[in-house]
Amino acid sequence: MFLGCIGDDFTGSSDLANTLAKGGMRVVQYSGVPSTDADASVEAGVVALKSRSIDPADAVAQSLAALEWLQAQGCTQFFFKYCSTFDSTAEGNIGPVAEALAQRLGSKKVIVCPAFPGTGRSIYMGHLFVNDVLLSESGMQNHPLTPMVDADIRRWLRPQTKLGVGHVAAQEVLQGSGAIKAGLAREDAAGNSLIVVDAMADPDLLEIGKAVADLPLITGGSGVALGLPANFAASGAISGEGATWRGQAGKCVAMSGSCSVATRGQVALHAKTNPVFEIVAEEVIEGRLTAQMVCDWAMAQDGIPLAYSSADPEVVKDVQAKFGLENAAGAIEGFFADLTGALVAAGVERLLPAGGETSGAVVEALGLTQLEIGPEIDPGVPALRAGSDLVLALKSGNFGAPDYFAKAAEILGQNP
Ligand SMILES: Nc1ncnc2c1ncn2[C@@H]1O[C@H](COP(=O)(O)OP(=O)(O)O)[C@@H](O)[C@H]1O
Ligand SMILES: O=C(O)[C@@H](O)C(=O)COP(=O)(O)O
């Protein structure tokens, strides 16, 4: 294994794995830190954690454990993957984890680059945009767990870390990898170890990729990974062949716990031609609705049944005010975990969870240890094989075309 990656959630990890696989690397996504060594054929390993919204000290401990395992697999470069919308709070967990990994690796020029132009995320003058609006006006200001109310990534990161936060701006990035390297050296000399790097389009990310070829630690969204396979190919380390994919045609069920603008749109479109079931948070928390009830409903439906708790920001705020944020999130995630167990026991072969935390709950419920990366469904969302008769796709709340659920069901069933 050459490239060792640590993802702070399960959807984000599959997003990164997708980019590396498309770049020709043999990638495996692990759920949590594996207890055994990786297969010798793996070129990039992605350890998926569910550490985005947990206590910062736990996130640091889990990330360092992942780092140690990846080091033991022979990795020479490490990648801390977080969300392209920089999901975090003043407490963390991006700053604390990046700082701990940097200290452990003795790494100083650590880039911070959540850009993912393929899904509309770009960074200009340290500010993160989603398409043509600032992050803080994109809907992410209403995120149930990590409301992103400031688009200036430098200002958002500073309270999260003791390390100096620097910036390599667009003018330097546009001049290519040499200028980016020079910018990183300047920030390092100024005592800034976490360096936000602007990136507006894929060619910028390819230049950034070249500039970081020799650095031990990279942090960012999956966009930065665009340029990394070429670095390993240039050194002759990887074959460039990737892996093969086998689909699964059995019963397919979708479930959504994401309350993002994109997912709510996908749920609404899917509901026009498929059976849907609204999971009302109060009914779950007060024990009036069980996972088995929803499973029985899904198994009796034709088409691609979708069970969702996705709700408008006002509804989410009311639920959180009544039951508490963590309590509400935990109850709904637990519900989706139970639903997953019931569905798989009932014979479901294709699962479509939507939402990062939701997908984490699904993968943990299944006790999956590793996932094989398949074809891309939509930017940032690959098909995944979880076992001999189970395939799934972990959709980030913000990702996917309006007809994502139907498209994903089809691709999971295909044999290219
Ligand atoms: N109706 C609801 N009320 C309150 N919280 C909700 C509701 N539906 C989902 N949630 C919680 O909101 C969070 C959504 O996060 P996540 O699944 O990561 O989606 P995204 O990918 O959009 O961030 C989860 O913790 C989920 O349990
Ligand atoms: O970078 C991204 O946007 C995704 O890879 C990601 O991390 C998704 O997180 P969720 O939106 O919580 O699913």
Image (cartoon, rainbow, N blue to C red):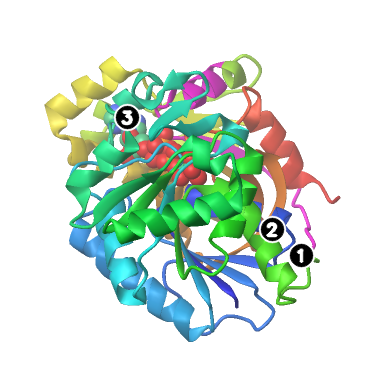
Q: Residue 143 carries which label?
A: 3
Q: What residue type is labelled 3?
A: His
Residue 56 horizontal/vertical position (percent): 21, 57
Secondary structure type for disc 2: helix
Q: Residues within 10 Å of mark 1 (few under 14, many from 20)?
A: some
Q: How crowded is mark 2: few (under 14 residues within 10 Å), some or many (20 or more)?
A: many
- Mark 2 vs 3: CB contact within 8 A: no
Snapshot quadrant of residue 139: top left
Secondary structure type for disc 1: loop
Residue 370 horizontal/vertical position (percent): 56, 67
Cα gap from disc 2 to disc 1, whole angstroms: 8 Å
- Residue pointed to by mark 1: 243
- N-terminal label among 3 and 1: 3
Is residue 133 left or right of 204 when viewed as pictured? left
Task: Give the residue displayed 49% in from the left and 47% down from the top.
Answer: 221
Snapshot quadrant of residue 288: top left
Residue 323 horizontal/vertical position (percent): 15, 32
- N-terminal label among 2 and 3: 2
Q: Give the range drawn in magenta.
A: 242-268
